Amino acid sequence: MQWPRVTTRERRWKMKKSFSRSTLRGQKGFSEIDLKLGMVSQDALRRALFPLGGLTKEFVKKIAAENGLHHVLEKKESMGICFVGKRNFENFILQYLQPRPGRFISIEDSKVLGTHKGWFLYTLGQRAKIGGLREPWYVVEKDSTRGDVFVAPRTDHPALFRDLLRTSRVHWIAEEPPAALVRDKMMECHFRFRHQMALVPCVLTLNQDGTVWATAVRPVRALTPGQFAVFYKGDECLGSGKILRLGPSAYTLQKGRSQSRVATEGSGDGPGSGPTF
């Protein structure tokens, strides 16, 4: 049975009752609560009301201005850690976790560039502050066992880009899982894993345990284990899964192809290695 779908961007949804609900992206292509709705249970979602679901932030501010709610207009955007605010992240974390000194290591030549107070203070893609170095370096990998943080010298370095990830068991909002994915074991859709990130076309492959592999049509910068990949089909938010594993980076693949090419060329240097007819 196909249950009626209720959207978060149509005002008339408030008048409908439904046994199953799905959510759509906002009018400007992104709803700030998409990343959270991707984890909400169907039981909770079908009882939820979203009175601002069909309105843009700018329009809500216009309503506030017309009604003299100036404190709403003057409130600054939240840019810091959720529920914590804008603080120095390192100082905040070290109030709760003991420092675990480690090394910054170049991904290109394994040279030690400096030291840090803990690998957990850094996320993939961020700039690493390395004492004594003027040029920017960016975090590309972390070794939690050894405590090493691997860095690359450019914000667009290929070590930052990957096109494959595996999630935990996906929480599907309206269907568990989508019929097309069950039937074909594969499905084209889009995903994002970061707030206000542009949607990326991908192909999902369903595993028997409910996890999925997501293969992006192009390498994506700073895919990060622990974050949630949220999946979309058209305007509909399908659900989400926690990123558990990543495929090799573009840099690793380039090195592998280069080494393979060198090995192939080198194999032609010995006696009798020329072409035979």
Image (tube, helix red, strand yellow):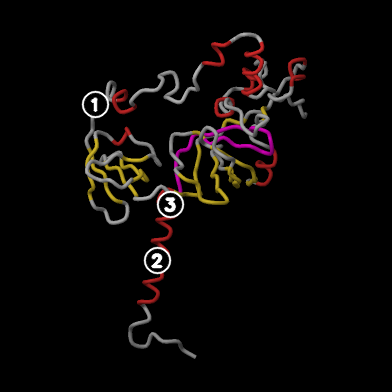
Q: Which residues are magenta?
A: 229-248
Observer-nearest residue: 141 or 241? 141
Element at label 2 = helix
Observer-nearest residue: 35 or 187? 35
**Residue at the outermost bottom position:** 277
Residue 32 vs 247, above or below: the answer is above
Residue type indicated by callout 1: Gln
Element at label 1 = loop
Observer-nearest residue: 85 or 74? 74
Q: Which residue is mark 3?
A: 249
Residue 113 vs 90, above or below: the answer is below
Element at label 3 = loop
Q: Which residue is mark 1?
A: 98
- Marks 1 and 2 sit apart, C-alpha to C-alpha, by 41 Å
Quadrant into which the N terminus falls:
top right
Labels 3 & 1 near each other (Cβ < 8 A)? no
